[in-house]
Amino acid sequence: MNRYDMPEGFLWGSATAGHQVEGNNVNTESWILEHLEGTIYAEPSGDGCDHYHRYADDIKLLAGLGFNSYRFSLEWARIEPAEGEFSRAALEHYRRVAAACRSHGLTPVVTLHHFTSPAWFMRKGGWLSEEAPALYARYAEKAIGAVGDLAGAVATFNEPNIARILDVILPFKIREGEFWASAAKEFGVPPGDLGLFQFVCEPRMWDIVHRAHAMARSMIKEKFPALPVGLTLALHDIQALPGGEEKAAGIRKYLAGEFLERLGGDDFVGIQTYSRMQIGPDGPARPAEGAELTQAGEEFYPEAIGGAVRYARDIAKIPVMVTENGVATEDDTRRVEYYRRALKSVAAAMADGVDIRGYFAWSAMDNFEWVSGYGPKFGLIAVDRKTFARTVKPSGEFLGAVARTGAVELD
């Protein structure tokens, strides 16, 4: 049987984000948004998966499946719950998480900001405030001081381009609704100055985030010169339909290219892909009639990751890490099929010369999926919503077995 052997040091893992799994992240802006009257969130995050307390068992479970890495995020709102007040207990907690990874043979890949920010930060305007880069860099210095010597790689930010993607694919304009006005009132800032990371697509926000990223990267490299630093981006595999070539080129640049072009000082870029986006003369086209759809409403198209990593390599011209890839489905047989085909696409890209340093499934466990609540199921591990009991799915066994061998079957 034909197979592709991943290089030595290739990272195999799954990913989580603090707010989505830890539970009771009460000092973050997302907690407030989830509880607003007229919220767009399907339900509050609540206890999450209680990963904050169960991380040791979860890490042991992932290591037992065969993975050699784990991507997780640190919560700024836990580490700095009030401006200028840093929690030693929270910093020590995340150090214990990283140490637990190392003790089980997992390389920690740490994300410093995965969508959520402290509520006090949002009351300053959040990611539309000129204070943001310095405030973030101060937090990042504290955070990296706790985990930097244990980490295998660090992503400063998760998907700073996500708001543009939502702007293109969602049928409503979130900043024009009642929810946005209510949120602005809650945080005490004018609606036009509310810098919610996931929902603002103004160029000035990307400029602010990029400055914060550059400041943090410089600080991290000064303290830990050998520690790889980058950020992650959400990328669809954007494909042009007949007559849509010009439109597709413009959308590709708007959603990803403008971000990738500015990462020349980074050690890697994390790519997070779930499906393709087909573009016709009038813009994004709906999936073809009869196409298999995921719980997220996207086309079941595992090969999207191959196109995404090639595009990222061509524009950023730095190594790539697949920091998220997965599918929302209740049918785990389809998840297994998704990963089987996606990994073939990753291996084919590597065989063609794309420098890919790791592959992380989204997600380690069924978790809180932002405005969709706990409905969409991405996890390799099921979580009982009442007891928090973990049950490994066949897809978890499948990916763990691949990780153990380090080889992808091509046919």
Image (spheres, helix red, strand yellow):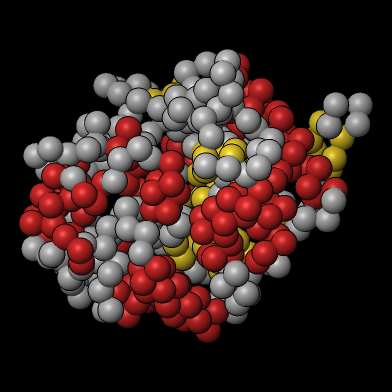
Q: How many marks?
A: 0
Quarter of the rendering containing residue 65: top right
Residue at the location (82% across, 31% down)?
Answer: 409
| Left or right relative to 382: residue 68 | right
Q: Point out the image quarter for the N terminus.
A: top right
Residue 359 coordinates in the image, percent (x, y): 64, 46
Q: Using the image, determine if residue 336 lies above or below residue 158.
A: above
Residue at the location (52% across, 50% down)?
Answer: 234
Residue most extreme to the bottom: 222
Residue most extreme to the right: 1
Q: Using the image, determine if residue 228 lies above or below residue 387.
A: below
Residue 76 coordinates in the image, percent (x, y): 30, 62
Residue 256 coordinates in the image, percent (x, y): 55, 57
Towards the viewer: 377 or 221:
377
Observer able to see residue 346: yes
Q: Point out the image quarter for the C terminus.
A: top right
Residue at the location (43% across, 59% down)?
Answer: 160
Observer able to see residue 153: no
| Left or right relative to 64: residue 127 | left
Residue 335 coordinates in the image, percent (x, y): 58, 24
Towards the viewer: 379 or 55:
379
Q: Using the image, determine if residue 39 lies above or below residue 385.
A: below
| Left or right relative to 411: residue 312 | left
Residue at the location (55% across, 79% down)?
Answer: 221
Towards the viewer: 13 or 378:
378
Towards the viewer: 58 or 240:
240
